[in-house]
Amino acid sequence: MQTPQSIDAVQTMLAETGYVCGRALATVVFLSLKLGRPLFLEGEAGVGKTEIAKALAAGLNRKLIRLQCYEGLDAASAVYEWNFPAQMVAIRTAEASGGADRKALQAELFSDEFLVERPLLEAMRPDENGAPVLLIDELDRTDEPFEAFLLEALSDFQVTIPELGTIKAPEPPIVILTSNRTREVHDALKRRCLYHWVDYPTFDREIEILQARAPEAAETLSREIVAFVQMLRTEDIFKKPGVAETIDWAKCLLALDVIDLSPEVISDTLGAILKYQDDIQKLQGSEAKRLLDEARAGLAPA
Ligand SMILES: Nc1ncnc2c1ncn2[C@@H]1O[C@H](COP(=O)(O)OP(=O)(O)OP(=O)(O)O)[C@@H](O)[C@H]1O
Ligand SMILES: [Mg+2]
């Protein structure tokens, strides 16, 4: 499938997969596709950073390859490993069958058959549907040496395996990097990428997202949910609810056949939007009522 030829086309394509994105995000996505530059997305938790890679892959009908970052992630887990147990078995089998030719055995042991491809190598392999979408998720969880390594990998999209030679991507993958900004990612890496800060959506956009992700919710309830969550985000709490929490909460309320919000319902279901006991405690009782009243006051008649 061809990449979209305009910003509007990007928005439409993503909307068809259920991803609602504003003009600014659609613009960087468009540019990143057009110029072949990696896209670096930062933002709070649950605002749709990871989801955009999934939506892009679905919209473009490309394979999605995900590299989940974590502390201690190294090149072996990101690029390739040799299947050591299988190599051992092959050696034993060769020995048992009367000592095969050493050279032939070595060549066999370090062939594709024993190569375990990890996400970065996989993303460089040609695919019949076109270059895959490579999601490098939560980059801030890795350490600096890995970042430096990544910088190189992203600059030339090739991997050298000493025993096999250099593998180069026929067409560079579409790269999306995400970070929750628990630490600052190095400038050198950022420089290679287009950058976008994914913010909490506006009221109208969050309503749209809810309509896309929980279409069963009636309009009045959706508006109350979004108004309340948006109000909650302005409060001094430890962990603000993301879009993911809004959707979860709506689904919980639907499962309980709630028609409109009340302080009691809110207290009973706070666990869907707040995940820290201190925050939950703060919202128990009269606080929930106050916020709900404020949220309702801000709602223009539908
Ligand atoms: N703009 C959007 N359109 C549609 N759905 C969205 C949008 N933003 C978020 N969502 C929903 O919110 C959920 C959480 O989004 P996602 O996992 O992408 O968040 P994230 O920013 O990667 O969070 P984290 O930092 O915790 O990984 C998704 O499963 C998706 O259903
Ligand atoms: Mg994520």
Image (cartoon, rainbow, N blue to C red):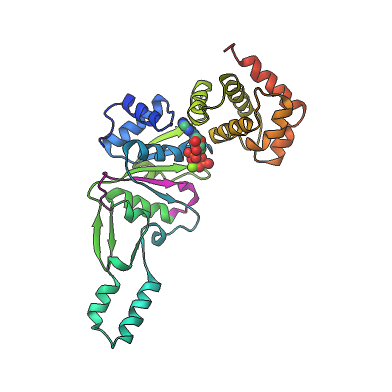
Q: How many marks?
A: 0
Quadrant assignment, res 117? bottom left
Residue 197 x, y percent position in the rendering: 45, 33
Quadrant of the frame with the C terminus? top right
Give left or right: position of 285 versus 10: right
Question: 210 or 156, which lies in front?
Answer: 210
The single residue placed furthest to the top in the displayed view is 301
Residue 138 x, y percent position in the rendering: 47, 46
Give left or right: position of 31 versus 245: left
Quadrant assignment, res 57? top left
- Residue 180 seen in render: no
Residue at left offset 43%, top offset 31%? 18
Residue at left offset 51%, top offset 20%? 204
Residue at left offset 71%, top offset 36%? 280
Q: Which residues are magenta?
A: 125-144
Q: Is residue 97 above or below residue 257?
A: below
Q: Is residue 131 above or below residue 288?
A: below
Residue 71 x, y percent position in the rendering: 50, 55
Q: Is residue 127 magenta?
A: yes
Question: 224 or 36, which lies in front?
Answer: 224
Give left or right: position of 289 versus 210: right
Residue at left offset 42%, top offset 34%? 196
Quadrant assignment, res 119? bottom left
Question: 200 or 193, which lies in front?
Answer: 200
Residue 154 x, y percent position in the rendering: 32, 49
